Image: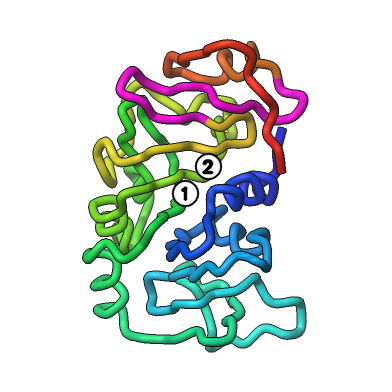
Amino acid sequence: MLSKEDIAKRISKEVKDGYYVNLGIGIPTLVANYVPENLNVEFQSENGVLGMGPFPYEGEEDADIINAGKQTITILDGGSFFDSAFSFGMIRSKKVDLTILGAMEVSENGDIANWKIPGKMVKGMGGAMDLVASAENIIVAMMHVNKAGESKILKKCTLPLTGVSCVKRVVTELAVLDVTPAGFKLVERAPGVSVEHIVQSTEADLIIEGEIPEMQF
């Protein structure tokens, strides 16, 4: 099974030259570490940053330069800072080509729950609602099962929804899944992980067609 870094590495293959990409909190923030240097990509953070680079090396952090998750980041040449109103103007006007988000649950029709667990204190939905409402292409980076081994890839989300029918693709430690009108389609499997194990770990039904290839990094 893949690590969080491996999930980010696989998702980096979805990033194309010239893209403007929003990175959500959690696993998505790691994606900037793995995009090839020959690609011209602008990573955006909703707190008002454009031109994020990889995470800084230990000892080179600048506490004044952070992403939406309050992690220290680097800024590439030409990067810029602006207020959150301007940042969400970019998001709402669909200037972002790809949005990569973390999630607690995703349903077979592309619903996403990623902001609240009932009974636990949260500060609010943040920018997730704007991102899922405005983005044309949403990829979710998440763990396939929770700590109890229960599936987070579901027929129907049980947690409060962030967005409805918006997710296009999900990448987990076990598999790459596409959200289709007929449900989840198994596209790739993690190296060494069998299709049978993925099926057993998934509450939702899976569309499986032919030989399922292993992920390539």
- Looking at the rendering, the stretch of residues picked out in magenta corresponds to 177-193
Residue 184 spot, x, y in % from top left: 42, 23
Residue at 45% x, 86% y is: 80
Residue 124 spot, x, y in % from top left: 29, 60
Residue at 37% x, 20% y is: 183
User: Looking at the image, is 71 positioned above or below residue 209?
Assistant: below
Do residues under tags 2 and 1 come within 8 Å of each other at their CB atoms?
yes
Residue 102 disc label: 1
Secondary structure category for the residue under label 1: strand
**Of pointers 2 and 1, the one earlier in the residue sequence:** 1
Residue to which mark 2 is pinned: 142
Q: Nearer the viewer, residue 81 or 14?
A: 14
| Quadrant assignment, res 2 | top right
Amino acid type at mark 2: Met
Which class describes the residues within 10 Å of circle 1: few (<14), some (14-19), or many (20+)?
many
Residue at 59% x, 26% y is: 149
User: Looking at the image, is 198 positioned above or below residue 31?
Assistant: above
| Quadrant assignment, res 109 | top left
57 relative position to 99: left or right: right
Residue 65 spot, x, y in % from top left: 54, 84
| Quadrant assignment, res 128 | bottom left
State which quarter of the image contains the C terminus: top right
Q: Main secondary structure of the magenta part?
A: strand
Amino acid type at mark 1: Gly
